[in-house]
Amino acid sequence: MITPAVFVTAQRSLSIAFTLAIVNGYLWIPTLFSLLGGVFLFLASAFMLYESRYDLSFIMGQIEITEYIKENIPARDP
């Protein structure tokens, strides 16, 4: 629920930065940095989604191996 609010706030502050960059001469530098920060934030989010999918498939594989061992290999008597 808080993520859309943060996204909207970031977009509003970015639009203010664009407006100031157009009006003033040297304010394009912070605008460039904010755009780069947004791009890197997006790339980090995409990478985290990919990594979580990879981790889930790894965990599911481990569960399948454990179930296979439990069903097909007899337990040792102590």
Image (tube, rainbow, N blue to C red):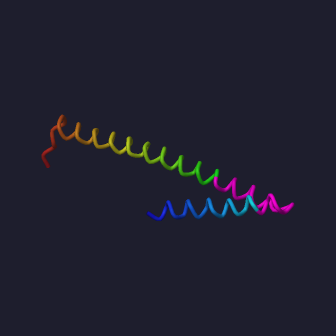
Above/below status of 31 relative to 78:
below
Q: Quadrant of residue 15?
A: bottom right
The part of the chain drawn in magenta is 20-38
75 or 12: which is nearer to us?
12
Q: Quadrant of residue 66?
A: top left
Residue ID at (63%, 62%): 12
Taking the magenta stretch, the answer to whether it contains residue 17 is no
Q: Quadrant of residue 14?
A: bottom right
70 displayed left or right of 15: left
Q: Main secondary structure of the magenta part?
A: helix
Pick out the residue farthest to the top.
72
Above/below status of 12 relative to 71:
below
- Number of marks in the image? 0
55 or 14: which is nearer to us?
14
Q: Position of residue 57 (x, y in %)?
A: 38, 41
Above/below status of 14 relative to 68:
below
46 displayed left or right of 18: left
Pick out the residue farthest to the left.
77
Q: Position of residue 75 (x, y in %)?
A: 15, 42
68 or 2: which is nearer to us?
2
Work out which quarter of the rendered image holds the N terminus and state it. Answer: bottom left
Q: Position of residue 42 (x, y in %)?
A: 58, 51
Q: Position of residue 24 (x, y in %)?
A: 84, 63
Residue ID at (49%, 61%): 3
